[in-house]
Amino acid sequence: MTNVTITWENDMHFVAQGDTGHAVYMDASAENGGHDSAARPMEVLLMGVLGCTAMDVISILKKKRQPVAGLQVLATGERAAEHPRYYTKIHLEYVAYGDVDPVALARSIELSETKYCSAIATVRGKATITSSSRVEPASAKPT
């Protein structure tokens, strides 16, 4: 069981805290009563998907002894026009840096997306999940 609490700070600023004790701050835009001082809840949802799959992919690549120097995963989400404005489509773009075998990267992504990533499993069915991947030289890794 996981326990998470969110506490209202002021205006539309909230702080969420889970079992680990680490905090995540959330806020709304000025036009929605906030101060634009933190991520929006739907951004945090996508960040959770990215964190889950990125950790899986790195773990699998390391087990495959791939010389991965870096990994970046970018998400693009499309939301329903009407409330509750859930994600209808999420595209994940995986970029591995280093001398990584593209086939090993693709298999690692497939395992994450179909077997291991609980965040993807949670949103799948509501959102269509697609992905793409590529390998770049280690020297191209963002700092």
Image: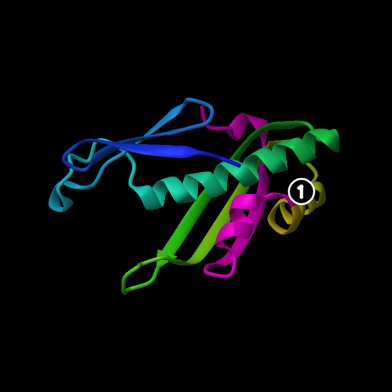
What residue is shown at x 22% (from left), y 41% (from top)?
36
Q: Position of residue 58 (x, y in %)?
A: 71, 37
- The answer, for residue 99, to whether it is visible in the render is no
- Which quadrant of the figure has residue 110? bottom right
Left of 21 or right of it: where is 26?
Answer: left
Instruction: Look at 58% across and 53% down and name the residue there.
Output: 93
Q: Residue at x 14, y 48 (%)?
A: 33
In the displayed structure, would residue 139 be above or below residue 3? above
Most foreground residue, 90 or 120? 120
Q: Nearer the viewer, residue 32 or 2?
A: 2
Residue 15 placed where, x, y %?
Answer: 33, 34
Q: Is residue 89 above or below residue 106?
A: below
Q: Amino acid at mark 1?
A: Ser
Left or right, 25 with respect to 94, comes to left
Q: Is residue 135 visible?
A: yes
Above or below residue 52? Residue 22 is above
Q: Quadrant of residue 85?
A: bottom left
Label 1: state its secondary structure. Answer: helix
Q: Residue furthest bottom?
A: 82
Residue at numbered disc 1: 108
In x, y percent, where is residue 28?
Answer: 24, 46
Q: Is residue 80 left or right of residue 72?
A: left
Residue bounds of the magenta highlight: 116-143
Asked which quadrant contains residue 23, the reply is top left
Left or right position of 135 against 93: right
